[in-house]
Amino acid sequence: MDEELLIAFDSTQQALRAEMLLEYAEIEIDIFPTPKEITAGCAMSIQFFRGALGEVRKIVAEQHVEIRGIFREAEEGGYALIGEKEGLDE
């Protein structure tokens, strides 16, 4: 099964913008409450599957979407920020 990742934002405006862009690109996403373990200025995050990570990163970069980061669930609990190169070679 494909791992679920989430994007956290500092503003609701950026979260809504990202939602629109990712839906337009036909990437399967869900709106997800930002977990309390992730410090962010927005209570809304976007959840997506790891298989779309490269395309998500490309859209975020090309469209200058401001994000707090992309996170995965950590094995020891909580969430971990994923690295810049992670998932781009898929």
Image: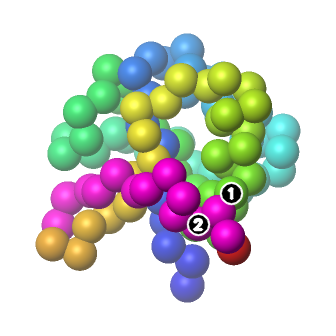
Q: Nearer the viewer, residue 84 or 18?
A: 84
Residue 83 appears in the picture as rendered: yes
**For mark 1, what is the residue?**
54
**For mark 2, what is the residue?**
87
Secondary structure under the numbered disc 1 in the rendered image: helix
Q: Nearer the viewer, residue 56 or 48?
A: 56
Position in image of residue 84 (x %, y %): 50, 52
Mark 1 vs mark 2, CA separation in Å: 6 Å
Q: Main secondary structure of the magenta part?
A: loop
N-terminal of the pair, mark 1 or mark 2, is 1
Q: Is residue 63 magenta?
A: no
- The extreme left residue here reads 76
Secondary structure under the numbered disc 2 in the rendered image: loop
**Magenta segment:** 77-89
Q: Which residue occupies 26% across, 67% down?
A: 74
Q: Nearer the viewer, residue 73 or 89?
A: 89
